[in-house]
Amino acid sequence: MREDLNVPMSKGAISDDARIRAAVPTLLHLAQRGAMVIVVSHLGRPKGVEPDLSLRPIAMHLARALDREVHFAEDCIGEPARVAVGKLQNGQVLLLENVRFHPEEEANDADFAHRLAALAELFVNDAFAVSHRAHASVVGVAAYLPAFAGELMEAELTALHQALDNPRRPMFAVVGGAKVSTKVGVLRNLLNKVDALLVGGAMANTFFKARGYPTGTGLVEDSALVEARQVAEKAGRKLLLPVDLVCARQMEAGQPLRIMDADRVEAGWMALDIGPKSVALFTQRLRGAGAVVWNGPMGVSEIRDFSDGTKAIGEAIASSGGYSLVGGGDTVAAVDALGLAGRFSHVSTGGGATLEYLEGKELPGIAILKEA
């Protein structure tokens, strides 16, 4: 089974186990039905073997989450893996060492994929979050074994399909975050699907500058001004930008704050959240939504002083009555931090994979499952 157990670590301890918890249902389902479950995952971006990025601590945490023993193999291929697999009994779970300790993983090396596949009889991909990567443990193994989607994978794809491909109307997208350049593909693809596109966060500054508005010392992507103009022209009246902004002189807690009109940000000040008029405007637009896709916070939500806009828009989406899909690491973190967890139809664990799906790209890990 390919799982995404790439959890954030701090001083050797897991700081957020959401991905481990998300993997439990499929693992438990298979183990309870008597399967010998061999789990493959990566952690971080190691250059060769890096002990600090070993999955051994993850095995212990996974055992607690599953309420059953999780065996551990010191490597994902070769003698350590073969011996560990050979000792497995029905219903037992084995976690292999970090698959990215081998450069062949990211190269999707056929021989490496074959050595992984030789350990098992069936392949289950439950790691939607890495399915935009054409890696050996995501794509390569499926060339050698009958391949299936896990329950988490199925839930992610069902949610994305319901929100994007067959939405109830009206359909809205709320897109925030820092940069236009990283989300221009998302913006263009969503414009073909939505009834309104609501843009907040620092990326709104780039749209403002493209219109000739002063943006003070706020973050602006000068290299994306042309793309912002193109998106705005294509969107026409579908595009909704903030009308006022919460500004400070520095991006730090405890700063004096001022509300400024979006087209009148003064020199020496930076926009760090959407203002109360924008919250009211966006909330009004979202009322009665059939479906809402939300990707990206409305401001620097990790600092309490600049989190009100993100929380208010999250509340508006959750209360809209529509099918709500939340995606993106920063957005999911904001949902948890601001007490909005459990309020949405689906919160994606996908990160980059969700972003690429929102762009309309085909994900290699999904494509190979369809073939298999």
Image (tube, rainbow, N blue to C red):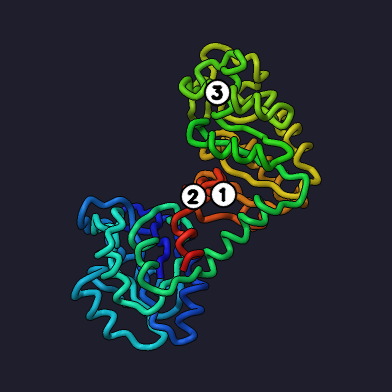
**What amino acid is found at the position of numbered circle 1 in the picture?**
Gly
Number of other residues with Cα within 10 Å of mark 3, as a class: few under 14, some 14 to 19, many 20 or more: many
Task: Assign a secondary structure to mark 2.
Answer: loop
Considering every residue shown, the one lying at the far right of the view is 288
Q: Nearer the viewer, residue 357 or 39?
A: 357
**What amino acid is found at the position of numbered circle 3 in the picture?**
Thr
Instruction: Give the quarter of the image for residue 195.
Output: top right
Q: Are marks 1 and 2 in contact (CB under 8 Å)?
A: yes
Q: Nearer the viewer, residue 300 or 321?
A: 321
Residue 242 lies left or right of residue 33; in this view the side is: right
Number of other residues with Cα within 10 Å of mark 2, as a class: few under 14, some 14 to 19, many 20 or more: some
Question: Which residue is under mark 3?
Answer: 206
C-alpha distance separating marks 1 and 2: 7 Å
Q: Which x, y percent locates residue 194?
A: 70, 41
Question: Which residue is under mark 1?
Answer: 327
- Examine the rendering and report whether any part of residue 219 can be seen: no
* Residue occupying image coordinates x 24% and y 78%: 82
